[in-house]
Amino acid sequence: MSEINLASERSSGRHRTPLMWLAFVLLICSGFRSAVAKENQPQIQAYRITILSTMLVGESTGLGEWGFAALVDADGHRVLVDTGSHPNTVMDNARDLGVDLSDVEEMVLTHNHPDHVRGLLTLRREMMKRNPKALSLVHVAEGIFDSRPSDHGERNPMIAIKREFEATGGRFVVHTSASELFPGAWLTGPVPRPFPERNWDDAGQVLTSSGLVEDNIPEDQSLVLNTPRGLVVLTGCGHAGIVNIVTFAEKHFDKRPIYGIVGGLHLFAATDQQLNWTAARLNEYGVANLLAAHCTGIEATYRLRDTLHLSRRTAVVASVGSTFSSEEAIKTGVLAR
């Protein structure tokens, strides 16, 4: 190498070194800002989730059914998640429990199955008599209105419900991805499924742009509350797989622990092998409480309790009127204790 080239190379190196350090510092600062941003994500301080529809009745109040619904009260925001199986169950249970739904304007439907959506029209029509905005806005995930044809006709009740609900002045918001519902409350939208959890029945097909394919309930979504003690995950049936759901939530919230899981996990028919795998993976997320409702299954709940090293106070079969709150964690009827 000539002296001129060598000098040029050394000169270039001298100029490059400060630039490299500057880039390194900017990278560190960027990472710090990102970490601070995640740590400063809004948190919900006061919340209560009340089960309004599930199979078990823990006391003499309310009616049990194969279905699910829960009311979320969080820092002044109220959202109804799912609407039960029979048209009147949630309305009647809310009345018996002294829960007023007339000032609840927003709902979340976790997926299209009848045992989660049949109460929608009854609730909207009844509550709008007292408040025209009551239960008028429904958050759903992409795919919930897709046709599910069968030999006996259309299997997706949401197609007909959509027309009737919109005729009342109600509106659907279709989410194609995760989004903030209100500060500290995160709606997953359709959940990525890196783990092969098969948490649905072999019940039919769904019509897509590629034709008929197996219906794995692609629109299944959950609601996640970011609280000071960790994340509270509210599921309808967990058809996306509870491990996939908490993995998605934990990634978004920078690996926060799972303080509570509330709702249906669709494990009632799971094999011992499936339950062991699910519990082992959930154990990695530090699950502190499980209020297992609807399709989780009684035996599955107890198996998860044992493997997650929880107790009869922190892993409970939910009943109508059961609550999970910032004050008391799990509170349920006498039969479910």
Image (cartoon, helix red, strand yellow):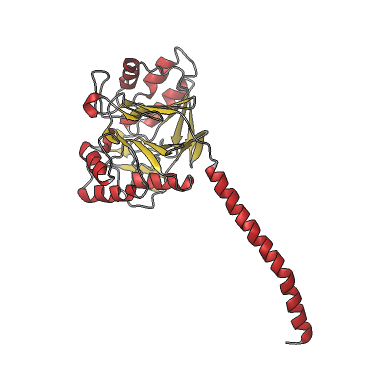
For image coordinates 26% across by 43% down, the residue present is 304
Quadrant in which residue 110 is drawn: top left
Looking at the picture, tell me which residue is in the foreground, 49 or 160. 49
- Residue 101's place in the image compared with 289, above or below, is above
- Residue 68's place in the image compared with 99, above or below, is below
**Residue 209: in sight, yes or no?**
no
| Rendered-image quadrant of the C terminus | top left
Q: Position of residue 190 (x, y in %)?
A: 43, 42
Quadrant in which residue 332 is drawn: top left
For image coordinates 29% across by 33% down, the residue present is 293
Looking at the picture, tell me which residue is in the foreground, 146 or 46. 46
For image coordinates 73% across by 78% down, the residue present is 9
Q: Position of residue 22 (x, y in %)?
A: 68, 61
**Residue 121: in sight, yes or no?**
yes
Looking at the picture, tell me which residue is in the foreground, 55 or 319. 319
For image coordinates 52% across by 33% down, the residue present is 183
Q: Position of residue 273 (x, y in %)?
A: 22, 51
Of all residues shown, which one is farthest toward the right?
4
| Rendered-image quadrant of the N terminus | bottom right
Of all residues shown, which one is farthest toward the bottom?
2
Q: Position of residue 202 (x, y in %)?
A: 26, 44
Total numbered labels = 0
Left or right of 248: which side holds 19?
A: right
